[in-house]
Image (cartoon, coloured by chain):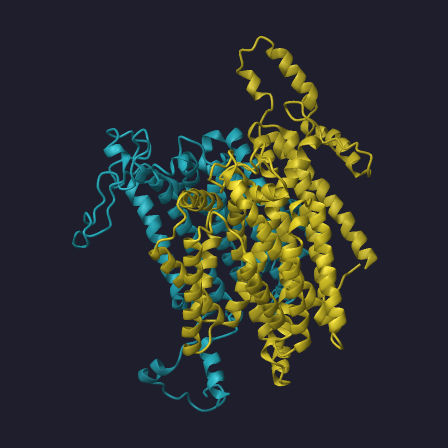
């Protein structure tokens, strides 16, 4: 195993060097950084040319210049020495000063999109595998093909128009008309009907219950101006966290497991107590307080599971931790919602919250909750764009993977042993179908970091993509190379993680030294 | 029958009996039949061909004029009705204006160029890019993958390490840099230059797949048989092994083509692809995105055509995959139903 890892590391470093060399030469071919001066009529034209030639070492031929650049870049490996030198931009800024901020906002963008795409994509993929050749399956297959064929810039602009501008207009007078309520309720009802399936009678019940519930909630929202003063409130909080507890128990332990039910129930009670008790603390919280609270939450969940668990501790601890984390998340969502009215009232926002450009409102006063809402409104549309396109791939992969697993002999064995269907699906099939997906997720994440260029351009988001795009169109080689090094390292690292995960999850895959 | 009873005279076979003998279908025929039975793929093929025919005949190609009255660079007779689209699809008996194209069905740009002609030109360019990238990738990827998989050893190492190198660079980044190079150095070639340069870099994924296929196929008995009977390496590779690996090549070429149109439009949107005054669907979207709220028709149509082309090509690719590899369709609905009724 050690030789395998060492070998992979050496190969990865060589790959990185080779790719960097190719990229450097291509960037050098892509244009002359001095071009803007040739046509200029500035009196000090010659000095400018000489200065930039000096700064970017343009008098050295490109293949050799690469090694000068590499010499500076190699210093990045020395830990804590802070000697990293990725060259200067055409304007004379250090590339290493530009990278961290750009990388930060891109990671923020890509992480949320990837996580959402994975969760939704895998859920839908697996449900459509379980309901193969039903209407739901066909509709989802078509939708995923459609999303797969969408150009991201087009989706982005459509979202800007239909989600941002229309929603902001809607907030001016937040009353849903009866037609909209009917349409939304019917669509929600159809989605639930497709997800749950079953006999005709059950389907009709599911459809009616979910559609009517949605309609009731929407009417309530409309009448109380909920969209201007959103909050979960104690009632919704209780209903939602009880729902979370029920779903977690049903998925992980089965509803007949009284101990798991108790563990989850305790979490709901604790969450309700915290909801009232923690508000003053949350008002003055910083990001670190929230992190600590999150850790405490998960620890409490695990502890409850440990104490209540009896013979099946591991399972109860998992149920406890997941329920605790999700209900605590609800408290946070509620707190962010409480910041919404004052966010809307800010003069910089002026009642039109969903942003179409940039990654934050400049000079926005307020606490972390206001800033959190601000990041949310800015990230919403680009995240949605990336998510819609990424989600299509995961749906297809997880559907194919699940079908593959369901066809295996051990699934038949499990059913023949008399295992409940839940256990067969969740324990035997689902876990094994995740193995190939885990590797795809890891290698996709690296690729997505690089692929967000178009989305960043549509939403004028100042991340890595913008850095690259500015660099290549000027052309300005060093930022391009700085971008490339970060992305290539990410791609290689995540591919490495993908390989490691695969051999860890599937013992049949041998690691050859 | 006749072969077993060697000594006896051959039985006379009459014409009626010949007709009853089922003729074995060739592998190609089986694949073709499976593809034709897939109605989604067939419908997609129909729509795709219709788009090609529409784009070529309307504004013409290769210097031959088409049936449409404007050209993509024609300033026309000035703005009619503020450039609003004249296309109407609602029949008169439904209270609409009746079905007609009108003077400028997709509207006009601000300087009066007919938008229908521009869109058609954009489609043509996208199709050219798509097909050239597809052909280049198929040829280079197949040759590299075949040589690497067949010879193995150091040849394989060198070729595959090179493809690994290129794969490390994300496609859109590679595309942007290469697109910039094409516009710097091959300005005169325009669309052709862009697609050739892109095609020279995008074959790596296909090469990997073909190599994988060759690695397993080269161990088959028929390869040994060919070698023993004195066939040269090139003949074994391209006459004996390749026909058995052709499914992989065709399917992944189709998928590359679907990705290529999204890549080209994306690059043109960013400004690294096709440049003005020529037209690309991505370029006209980027030129008109700010006018969305006032003139949405300038934005909708190019996007719709991108989606239609990419979607149909993806469905065709999926249909081809099913046709070439029926084993992937493990769950046959009829069999599932039989099983359910049996249990």
Q: Would you place residue A9 above or below residue B326 in this image?
A: above
Q: Quadrant of residue A486?
A: top right
Q: Is residue A56 left or right of residue A458?
A: right
Q: Chain A's colour?
A: yellow
Residue at 44% from the left image edge and 50% from the top image edge: A225
**B49 or A156, which is in the foreground?**
A156
Residue A384 appears in the picture as rendered: yes
Residue A82 appears at what percent x and percent y? 79, 33
Q: Nearer the viewer, residue A437 or A261?
A: A261
Residue B159 seen in render: no
Residue A202 placement: quadrant = bottom left
Q: Residue furthest left?
A: B93
Q: Is A147 above or below relative to A239?
A: above
Q: Position of residue A57 (x, y in %)?
A: 70, 23
> How far across and how far down the image is residue B13, in percent?
36, 85
Depth check, front residue: A106 or B198? A106
Colour that chain B carries in the picture: cyan
Q: Nearer the viewer, residue A146 or A329?
A: A329
């Amino acid at each position: 195993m050690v030789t395998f890892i060492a070998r992979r590391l050496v190969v990865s470093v060589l790959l990185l060097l080779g790719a960097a060399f190719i990229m450097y030469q291509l960037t050098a071919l892509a244009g002359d950084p001095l071009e803007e001066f040739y046509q200029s009529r500035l009196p000090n034209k010659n000095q400018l040319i000489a200065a930039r030639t000096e700064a970017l070492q343009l008098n050295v031929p490109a293949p050799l210049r690469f090694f000068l650049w590499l010499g500076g870049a190699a210093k990045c490996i020395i830990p804590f020495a802070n000697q990293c030198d990725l060259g200067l931009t055409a304007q004379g800024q250090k590339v290493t000063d530009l990278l961290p901020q750009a990388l930060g906002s891109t990671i923020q963008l890509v992480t949320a999109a990837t996580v959402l795409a994975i969760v939704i994509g895998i859920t839908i993929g697996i449900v459509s595998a379980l309901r193969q050749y039903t209407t739901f399956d066909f509709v989802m297959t078509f939708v995923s093909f459609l999303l797969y064929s969408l150009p991201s810039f087009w989706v982005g602009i459509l979202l800007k128009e239909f989600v941002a501008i229309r929603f902001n207009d809607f907030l001016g007078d937040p009353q849903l008309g009866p037609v909209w309520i009917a349409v939304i309720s019917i669509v929600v009802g159809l989605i639930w009907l497709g997800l749950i399936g079953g006999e005709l009678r059950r389907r009709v019940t599911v459809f009616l219950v979910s559609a009517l519930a949605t309609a009731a909630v929407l009417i309530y929202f409309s009448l109380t101006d909920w969209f201007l003063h959103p909050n979960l409130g104690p009632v919704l909080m209780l209903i939602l966290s009880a729902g979370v507890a029920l779903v977690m128990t049903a998925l992980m332990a089965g509803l007949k497991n009284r101990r798991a039910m108790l563990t989850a129930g305790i979490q709901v009670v604790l969450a309700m107590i915290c909801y009232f008790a923690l508000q003053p603390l949350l008002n003055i919280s910083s990001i670190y307080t929230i992190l600590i609270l999150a850790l405490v939450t998960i620890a409490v969940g695990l502890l409850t599971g440990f104490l209540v668990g009896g013979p099946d501790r591991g399972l109860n601890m998992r149920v406890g931790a997941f329920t605790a984390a999700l209900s605590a998340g609800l408290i946070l969502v509620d707190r962010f919602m409480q910041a919404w009215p004052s966010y809307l009232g800010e003069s910089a926002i002026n009642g039109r919250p969903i942003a179409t450009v940039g990654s934050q409102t400049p000079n926005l006063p307020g606490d972390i909750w206001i800033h959190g809402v601000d990041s949310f409104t800015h990230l919403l549309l680009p995240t949605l764009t990336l998510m819609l396109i990424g989600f299509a791939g995961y749906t297809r992969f997880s559907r194919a993977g699940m079908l593959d697993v369901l066809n295996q002999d051990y699934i038949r064995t499990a059913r023949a042993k008399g295992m409940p269907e839940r256990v067969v699906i969740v324990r035997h099939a689902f876990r094994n179908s995740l193995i190939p997906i885990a590797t795809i997720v890891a290698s996709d994440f690296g690729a997505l970091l690089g692929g967000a260029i178009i989305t960043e351009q549509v939403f004028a988001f100042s991340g890595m993509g913008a850095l690259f795009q500015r660099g290549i169109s000027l052309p300005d080689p060093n930022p391009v190379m700085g971008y490339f090094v970060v992305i290539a390292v990410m791609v290689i690292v995540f591919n490495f993680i993908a390989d490691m995960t695969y051999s860890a999850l599937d013992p049949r895959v041998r690691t050859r030294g | 029958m006749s072969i077993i009873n060697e000594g006896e005279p051959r039985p006379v076979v009459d014409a009626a009996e010949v007709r009853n003998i089922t003729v074995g279908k060739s592998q190609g025929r089986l694949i073709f039949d499976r593809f034709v039975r897939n109605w989604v793929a067939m419908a997609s093929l129909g729509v795709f061909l219709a788009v090609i025919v529409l784009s070529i005949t309307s504004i013409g190609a290769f210097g031959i004029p088409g049936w449409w009255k404007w050209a993509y660079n024609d300033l026309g007779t000035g703005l009619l009705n503020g450039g609003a689209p004249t296309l109407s699809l609602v029949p008169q008996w439904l209270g609409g204006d009746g079905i007609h194209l009108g003077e400028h069905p997709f509207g006009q740009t601000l300087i009066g160029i007919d938008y229908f002609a521009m869109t058609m030109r954009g489609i043509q360019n996208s199709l050219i890019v798509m097909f050239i990238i597809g052909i280049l990738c198929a040829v280079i990827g197949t040759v590299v993958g075949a040589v690497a998989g067949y010879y193995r050893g150091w040849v394989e190492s060198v070729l595959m390490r090179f493809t690994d190198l290129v794969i490390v660079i994300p496609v859109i980044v590679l595309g942007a840099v290469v697109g910039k190079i094409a516009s710097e150095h091959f300005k005169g070639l325009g669309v052709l230059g862009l697609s050739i340069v892109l095609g020279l870099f995008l074959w790596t994924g296909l090469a990997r797949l073909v190599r994988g296929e060759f690695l397993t196929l080269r161990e088959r008995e028929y390869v040994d048989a060919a070698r023993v009977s004195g066939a040269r390496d090139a003949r074994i590779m391209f006459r004996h092994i390749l026909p058995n690996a052709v499914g992989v090549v065709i399917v992944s070429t189709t998928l590359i083509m679907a990705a290529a149109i999204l890549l080209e439009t994306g690059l043109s949107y960013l400004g690294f692809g096709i440049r003005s005054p020529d037209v690309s669907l991505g370029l006209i979207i980027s030129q008109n995105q700010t006018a969305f709220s006032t003139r949405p028709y300038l934005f909708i149509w190019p996007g719709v055509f991108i989606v239609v082309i990419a979607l149909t090509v993806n469905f065709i690719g999926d249909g081809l995959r099913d046709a070439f590899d029926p084993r992937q369709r493990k769950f046959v609905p009829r069999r599932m139903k039989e099983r359910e009724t049996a249990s």
